[in-house]
Amino acid sequence: MLDACALFAYIGKKPGALKVNEILKEAVRGHCRTLMSTVNYGELYALLLRDKGEEGALQVMFALGPLPIALQDATAQRCFRAAELKSKYKLYYVDAFAAALAVEHKATLVTSDSDFRRLGHGFRIAWLRP
């Protein structure tokens, strides 16, 4: 389960990029399933717009298309679960979508976003940086 900063690190070859690359390779081999909320995918696009402008952002998003990432829609049920997690853990709403999807699928959340430390020990998180 990836959040936006995990893919942003991968794209920018930032700390944690190799770990994300290994996860994606495992997904290609069929050893794991890589999920991402469409809300977090949109957040990635916003980050790219800021850094690369519209043309550059669209090029990167197009290049990501073949990656083995199963995008999950923001259903009403997921929106409510995200709102509950936002309220309980004081997360940004967009981050709460990543957390909600991880809970729903009993998945490990791959991130470097320190805001997820608020979730405590009940959540499985693979940190891209210490």
Image (cartoon, rainbow, N blue to C red):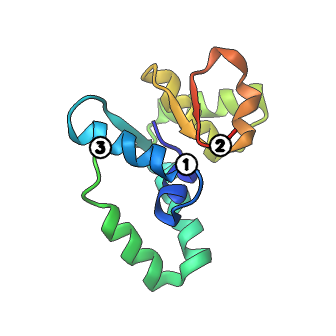
Amino acid type shown at disc 1: Gly
Sequence order check, earlier mark of 3 and 2: 3
Of residues 53 and 38, the one nearer the viewer is 53
Please tell me in which quadrant of the rendered image residue 62 appears: bottom left
Question: Which residue is located at x 24 percent, y 58 percent?
Answer: 66
Amino acid type shown at disc 3: Lys
Sequence order check, earlier mark of 3 and 1: 1
Q: CA distance from mark 3 to mark 1?
A: 14 Å
Q: Which label sits on residue 129?
A: 2
Q: Is residue 16 visible?
A: yes
Judge left or right: residue 65 versus residue 51. left
Quadrant (top left/top right/bottom left/bottom right) for the C terminus = top right
Judge left or right: residue 67 versus residue 6. left
Residue 73 in percent (x, y) is at 40, 43
Disc 1 vs disc 2: Cβ atoms closer than 8 Å? yes
Residue 116 in percent (x, y) is at 69, 35
Please tell me in which quadrant of the rendered image residue 64 appears: bottom left
Of residues 128 and 117, the one nearer the viewer is 128
Could you tell me which secondary element the residue under label 3 belongs to?
Answer: helix
Residue pointed to by mark 3 = 25
Amino acid type shown at disc 2: Arg
Quadrant (top left/top right/bottom left/bottom right) for the N terminus = top left
Question: Which residue is located at x 50 percent, y 27 percent?
Answer: 108
Q: CA distance from mark 3 to mark 2?
A: 20 Å
Sequence order check, earlier mark of 1 and 2: 1
Could you tell me which secondary element the residue under label 2 belongs to?
Answer: loop
Q: Is residue 71 visible?
A: no
Could you tell me which secondary element the residue under label 1 belongs to?
Answer: loop
Residue pointed to by mark 1 = 16
**Residue farthest left in this picture:** 29
Q: CA distance from mark 1 to mark 2?
A: 6 Å
Please tell me in which quadrant of the rendered image residue 26 appears: top left
